[in-house]
């Protein structure tokens, strides 16, 4: 009998929504300095996303991945690949945060777009591994 996993404190949908919030602020900024308190809003949404991402990755690495590894050596290799993807995701998070803090709005938006695509790919890969581990 398998032990049920604790629930993820930050579900995939919340994580992608928070990144979309950042992107929304970045898009608005492309139209010029028409929004009052833009910097604070962008910083706030960026900080909220980074916090959610950190909690999400920590849960997966401390709870989900160990559980998946126990499904066998084939799945364990896939979990290693997922862990590697987490490294790439952290790199994109750092790049995004640096671009936002330095005021490079166009670059930040492009990084956020790449980030979102990478995040969706990772979510799909993770779901596939979890489905195969369950069978």
Image: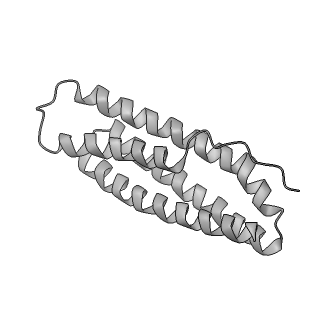
Residue 75 vs residue 84, the one in the foreground: 75
The tally of labels here is 0
Q: Is residue 74 left or right of residue 23?
A: right
Residue 67 vs residue 38, the one in the foreground: 67
Residue 134 vs residue 100, the one in the foreground: 134
Tell me the residue at 13%/33% (across/down).
33
Q: Measuring from the top left, give residue 101's x and y in whole percent.
A: 35, 36
Residue 104 appears in the figure: no
Rendering quarter of residue 2: bottom right
| Quarter the C terminus occupies | bottom right
Up-down relation of residue 50 to residue 106 (above or below): above
Tell me the residue at 49%/65% (across/down).
121
Q: Measuring from the top left, give residue 122's x and y in whole percent.
A: 54, 62
Tell me the residue at 74%/46% (across/down).
62
Which residue is at the far right? 1
Q: Describe the colour scheme in one phrase.
A: one colour
Q: Is residue 49 left or right of residue 6?
A: left
Which residue is at the far front? 1
Tell me the residue at 61%/63% (across/down).
126
Q: Measuring from the top left, give residue 77's x and y in whole percent.
A: 74, 71
Which residue is at the far bottom? 74
Q: Is residue 85 left or right of residue 24?
A: right
| Quarter the N terminus occupies | bottom right
Residue 87 appears in the figure: yes
Q: Measuring from the top left, give residue 69's x and y in whole percent.
A: 79, 62
């Amino acid at each position: 009998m398998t032990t049920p996993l604790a629930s993820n404190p930050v579900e995939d949908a919340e994580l992608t929504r928070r990144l979309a919030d950042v992107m929304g602020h970045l898009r608005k900024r492309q139209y010029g300095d028409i929004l009052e308190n833009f910097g604070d809003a962008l910083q706030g949404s960026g900080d909220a996303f980074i916090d959610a991402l950190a909690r999400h990755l920590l849960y997966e690495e401390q709870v989900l991945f160990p559980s998946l590894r126990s499904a066998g050596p084939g799945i364990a290799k896939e979990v290693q690949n997922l862990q590697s993807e987490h490294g790439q995701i952290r790199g994109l998070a750092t790049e995004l945060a640096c671009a936002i803090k330095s005021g490079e709005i166009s670059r930040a938006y492009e990084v956020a777009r790449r980030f979102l695509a990478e995040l969706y790919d990772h979510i799909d890969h993770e779901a596939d591994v979890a489905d195969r581990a369950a069978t």
